[in-house]
């Protein structure tokens, strides 16, 4: 299987899993909100925001370790991959134990003395945080093993494990509707058990499948590799910290100003946007190791070409689902949650727009990470996201509504995207005009076509499920037609036709043999 076909297979597997997970999440979220109630649901999102800082660290570390894995794979050096694996394992073991020693007292202090939590729910919030630490520790230690799946481009198998996790989470949410004790604690413990089980299974699978996942204690503390991984990770932490500081800091800011009720609305909005974002991230997850491997081979043209397509395809995939959601958000929330918390619809629209802005340059972020020169990039571009929280604080101090936080999200996401374009011009010599003509304008055209197609039935029909179906169908059709005729270039048309012919040929051969 050539790299292009493997990329298509990985993308299809990830996208299918994401659609499946989205469908399950839509049903299960309704059960969770109904069982917990708005206050406890807001508390789960809020206390979770304390632990998310630790979880986000796993994502940054996984990307960093995976980058070195994929780069060495591109160079064809399996022994070097093993060395990098052991370096990553030693780092994550140290981080895992540091997490328990430092994160535990700090998190409990924040819950007990900083957050606005009803007195009768503080004890439960402590236990939710403690069991969440267990899952965070397990996830952190498993990062090098999971990163090997990505670096080796076993994306389809990762999608299978993700699908299993979604099924288990769906089962847990259904069980929550039958439970009559403390639903918040029951749900938190259940989520932790699922996460630990999936992570443990993936670690065992990696040990069996990948010879590079061979533990060699003598190679744990190689100073050269430790320095390389930690330097790369430290600078990526700046950008990642900006995102986490923005998201979780905003949740805490809303809690201090308006209480858990608004946290429930913000939590629902984040969940809607994250599920939609997964549909795009599934494709981007297939692109990232291929971009890094191409850079490791010294194929700069393929690296930049894939980064352009990752930005364009990622944005278009978000548009497919974001436009119908934005247009019909009020009805969808009532259909989904019956009585959604106040401000939920506008929060959802604003955060979806934030993801659209971010996706337009995500491929460029991958190219910079593949190159490895991330210090100045993360210090300026990633650090700009930290501006979200003070900007949101100013909006709230001026008396603007809670949803003004979403406006701050969009402003800083736009600044970050412009910064990515300028840094790629500096590091790779890529003209800004190429991004404008190859990514921005095609995505604007697709978004405009989808919006116009969606607004026609929205304006002409009364609120109903039939209108929702018409809006969604016409929006998706408008997106696909505009993508094929206006957003794709001749090479993309040729690539799709060739893969379609190859697929039909394989199907024909299989039918002939049977």
Image: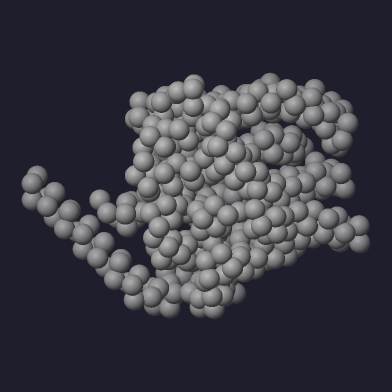
Q: Residue at x 57, y 42 (%)?
A: 228
> Residue 202 appears at what percent x and percent y?
44, 29
> Residue 426 appears at what percent x and percent y?
59, 68
In this rendered view, identify the residue nearer to me: 333 or 432.
432
Q: Residue at x 27, y 54 (%)?
A: 2
Q: Residue at x 60, y 74 (%)?
A: 459
Q: Residue at x 52, y 71 (%)?
A: 430
Q: Seen in the image, is 510 located left or right of residue 278?
A: left
Residue that sits furthest to the right in the current view: 398
Residue that sits furthest to the left in the current view: 513
> Residue 249 appears at what percent x and percent y?
77, 46
In this rendered view, identify the residue nearer to me: 284 or 185.
284
> Residue 291 appears at what percent x and percent y?
44, 55
Q: How is the image coloured?
A: one colour
In this rendered view, identify the residue nearer to me: 481 or 240.
240
Examine the rendering and report whether any part of residue 171 can be seen.
Answer: no
Question: How many numbered marks does the figure carry?
Answer: 0
Quadrant holding the C terminus: top left
Is residue 502 depicted above or below 9 in this figure?
below
Examine the rendering and report whether any part of residue 258 can be seen.
Answer: yes
């Amino acid at each position: 299987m050539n790299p292009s076909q493997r990329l298509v297979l990985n993308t299809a597997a990830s996208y299918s899993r994401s659609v499946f997970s989205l469908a399950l999440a839509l049903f299960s979220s309704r059960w969770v909100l109904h069982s917990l109630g708005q206050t406890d649901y807001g508390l789960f999102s809020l206390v979770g925001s304390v632990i998310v800082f630790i979880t986000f660290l796993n994502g940054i570390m996984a990307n960093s370790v995976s980058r070195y894995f994929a780069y060495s794979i591109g160079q064809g050096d399996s022994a070097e991959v093993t060395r990098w694996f052991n370096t990553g394992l030693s780092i994550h073991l140290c981080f895992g134990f540091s997490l328990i020693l430092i994160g535990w007292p700090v998190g409990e202090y924040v819950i007990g003395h900083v957050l606005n939590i009803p007195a009768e729910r503080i004890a439960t919030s402590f236990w939710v945080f403690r069991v969440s630490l267990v899952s965070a520790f397990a996830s952190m230690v498993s990062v090098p093993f999971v990163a090997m799946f990505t670096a080796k481009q076993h994306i389809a198998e990762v999608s299978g494990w993700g699908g299993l996790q979604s099924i288990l989470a769906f089962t847990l949410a259904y069980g929550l509707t039958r439970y009559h004790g403390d639903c918040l604690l029951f749900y938190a413990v259940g989520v932790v058990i699922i996460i630990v089980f999936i992570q443990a299974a993936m670690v065992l699978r990696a040990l069996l499948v990948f010879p590079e996942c061979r533990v060699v204690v003598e190679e744990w503390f190689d100073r050269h590799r430790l320095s390389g991984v930690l330097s790369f990770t430290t600078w990526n932490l700046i950008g990642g910290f900006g995102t986490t500081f923005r998201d979780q800091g905003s949740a805490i800011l809303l809690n201090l100003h308006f209480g858990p009720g608004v946290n429930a609305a913000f939590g629902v909005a984040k969940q809607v946007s994250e599920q939609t974002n997964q549909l795009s991230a599934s494709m981007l997850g297939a692109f990232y190791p291929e971009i890094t491997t191409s850079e490791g081979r010294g194929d700069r043209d393929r690296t930049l070409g894939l980064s352009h397509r990752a930005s364009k395809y990622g944005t278009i995939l978000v548009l497919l689902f974001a436009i119908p959601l934005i247009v019909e958000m009020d009805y969808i929330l009532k259909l989904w949650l019956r009585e959604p918390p106040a401000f939920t619809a506008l929060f959802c629209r604003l955060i979806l727009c934030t993801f659209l802005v971010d996706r337009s340059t995500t491929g460029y972020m991958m190219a910079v990470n593949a190159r490895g020169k991330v210090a100045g990039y993360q210090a300026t571009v990633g650090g700009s996201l930290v501006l979200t929280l003070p900007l949101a604080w100013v909006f709230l101090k001026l008396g603007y509504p809670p949803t003004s936080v979403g406006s701050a999200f969009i402003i800083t996401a736009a600044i970050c995207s412009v910064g990515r374009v300028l840094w790629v011009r500096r590091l790779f010599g890529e003209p800004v005009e190429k991004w404008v003509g190859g990514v921005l304008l095609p995505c604007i055209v697709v978004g405009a076509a989808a919006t116009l197609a969606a607004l026609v039935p929205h304006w002409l029909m009364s609120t109903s499920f039939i209108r929702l179906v018409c809006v969604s169908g016409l929006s998706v059709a408008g997106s696909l037609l505009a993508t094929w005729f206006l957003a794709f270039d001749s090479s993309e048309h040729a690539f799709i036709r060739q893969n379609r012919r190859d697929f039909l040929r394989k199907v024909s051969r299989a039918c002939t043999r049977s």
